Amino acid sequence: MNWTCVHTGKTGDLMARDMLSKPLLWGVGTVRTLRAHWVLNELGIDYETQPVKPRTDTMERADFLAVNPDKKVPVLQHGDLTLVESSAIMIYLAETYADRAPGLIPQDRIQRARVFEWMSFISTELDAASLYTIRKHQDLEHIYGSAPIAVDSAGDYFLRMVRKPARVLVSGQRYLLGDQFTLPDILLFTCLRFADRMGVQRPAEFDTYYNMLAERPAFQAAERANYP
């Protein structure tokens, strides 16, 4: 997965205006929308939510289709910016409001690189390659077709790949980057929750970590916003 930074060419006045505008988040009801809600709550940002949920009539709303005709959530609107993809939204918010929670993406260049390394790994190997394959051919087989061998293989692959963060956590670290809670922890938690829902048993090595993150006030606020 490639991370792309786009220079908007905005003047300082325009950037300041965007900072003063209230973020608008489209999307509820999935682990991917939960990620965006969680970051917003970690940052303590006052934001608005449009409760658009995949595979419901809300996806056909004209105002939503004007924002994202691809019918995908989450979508963030902030000033002149419209942004899709949960990881991109997480990074944008953490960097835009870095003064509110500077640890979400550390300033140290090595630690920043580790953040993006973990985010790439989790988004591709755990989410897209494993869990969403199960969802497509299990929960959504009426659309994508039944593929029990693919489902079983994807579950096995998830359990192999998730050993990588497990090794880090059982070594004595509280979080993926040591003692600092960062964006990859949000991604990992949501994938562990996704795995539970897809019938893939969460390895016991994650129990302490999972329960600790579930106690975060920002997570609990995000849960309420994401599952109204």
Image (cartoon, helix red, strand yellow):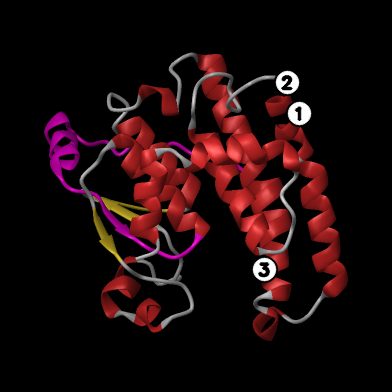
Q: Above or below — where is 115 with respect to 217?
A: above
Q: CA distance from mark 2 to mark 3?
A: 31 Å
Residue at (78, 37) in percent of width and height: 163
* Type of amino acid at the residue the image marks with label 2: Ser
Residue at (84, 64) in percent of width and height: 152
Percent from the top left, x then y, of residue 224? 35, 57
Percent from the top left, x then y, of residue 219? 41, 44
Observer-side mark, 1 or 3, equals 1
Q: CA distance from mark 1 to mark 2?
A: 6 Å
Observer-side mark, 2 or 3, equals 2
Answer whether labels 1 and 3 touch (C-beta < 8 Å): no
Please tell me in which quadrant of the rendered image residue 200 appears.
bottom right
Type of secondary structure dominating the magenta stretch:
loop
Q: CA distance from mark 1 to mark 3?
A: 26 Å
Q: Above or below — where is 214 with respect to 145?
A: above
Q: Nearer the viewer, residue 130 or 207?
A: 207
Percent from the top left, x then y, of residue 41? 32, 42
Residue at (65, 78) in percent of width and height: 140
Q: Mark 1 highlights which residue?
A: 167
Q: Mark 3 highlights which residue?
A: 135
Answer whether labels 1 and 2 touch (C-beta < 8 Å): yes
Q: Which mark is residue 66?
A: none
Which stretch did the figure color magenta?
A: 1-30
Can residue 26 be seen in this snapshot?
yes
